[in-house]
Image: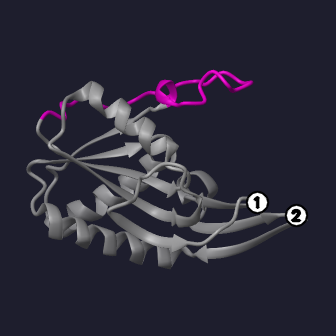
Amino acid sequence: MILERQILNQRDIQITIERLCHQLIEHHGDFKNTVIVGVQPRGKLLSNRIIIELKKLLNTNNIESGSLDISFYRDDLRRRKEPIVPEVMDMNLSLESKNVVLIDDVLFTGRSIRSAIDALMAFGRPNSVELLTLIDRRFSRELPIQPNYVGRTVDSIDYERVIVEWKEENGKDRILMVKSN
């Protein structure tokens, strides 16, 4: 039996994204030395939303961004039964001496973010790396990784999953907590 509970609806997600953008502006100002990088696949959708909102709030089109494929940096690469198929990455920029805001939808064990940090280093040595996540599953961390910017903190246990649905892929925006018995 599968039970699901909606954590955030479309309006809640939009309000959360706006709040996160205001926090980013407080810390990064005009974004002249900041690059936004979405972790593929799901972090890219969130980073696109963040970038659109930042451009509106700052009245600019000059926000450097990219998307990062972490496939070959994963620590479970050789343990998987199915081969990992890399995605097309959009990282035509240098991160040398830049402030990087790494964006992913859900922070769970921290392993994907560790992989993303490893992958980032192929594009230069950033001045700093911060993490923005829409959902922080705080009781499930396996690595000492914490977000700098959090949309919502969710307390969950192992058999619960957090599912982020985007209208670009699923027809509507919502975040669900799914329990399977």
Furthest residue toward right: 1
Q: Quadrant of residue 165?
A: bottom right
Q: Position of residue 157 (x, y in %)?
A: 69, 65
Kind of residue indicated by mark 1:
Tyr
Relative depth, front residue between 64 and 136: 136
Q: Residue at x 61, y 25 (%)?
A: 84
Q: Residue at x 16, y 52 (%)?
A: 61
Q: Position of residue 130 (x, y in %)?
A: 28, 53
> Which mark, residue 159?
1
Q: Position of residue 94 (x, y in %)?
A: 18, 30
Kind of residue indicated by mark 2:
Asn
Question: Relative to 159, is 34 above or below?
Answer: above
Q: Which residue is mark 2?
A: 181
Q: Main secondary structure of the magenta part?
A: loop
Q: Residue at x 28, y 30 (%)?
A: 121
Circle 2/circle 1 CB separation < 8 Å: yes
Query: Dot 1: few (<14), some (14–19), or many (≥20) neighbours within 10 Å?
Result: few
Q: Quadrant of residue 162?
A: bottom right
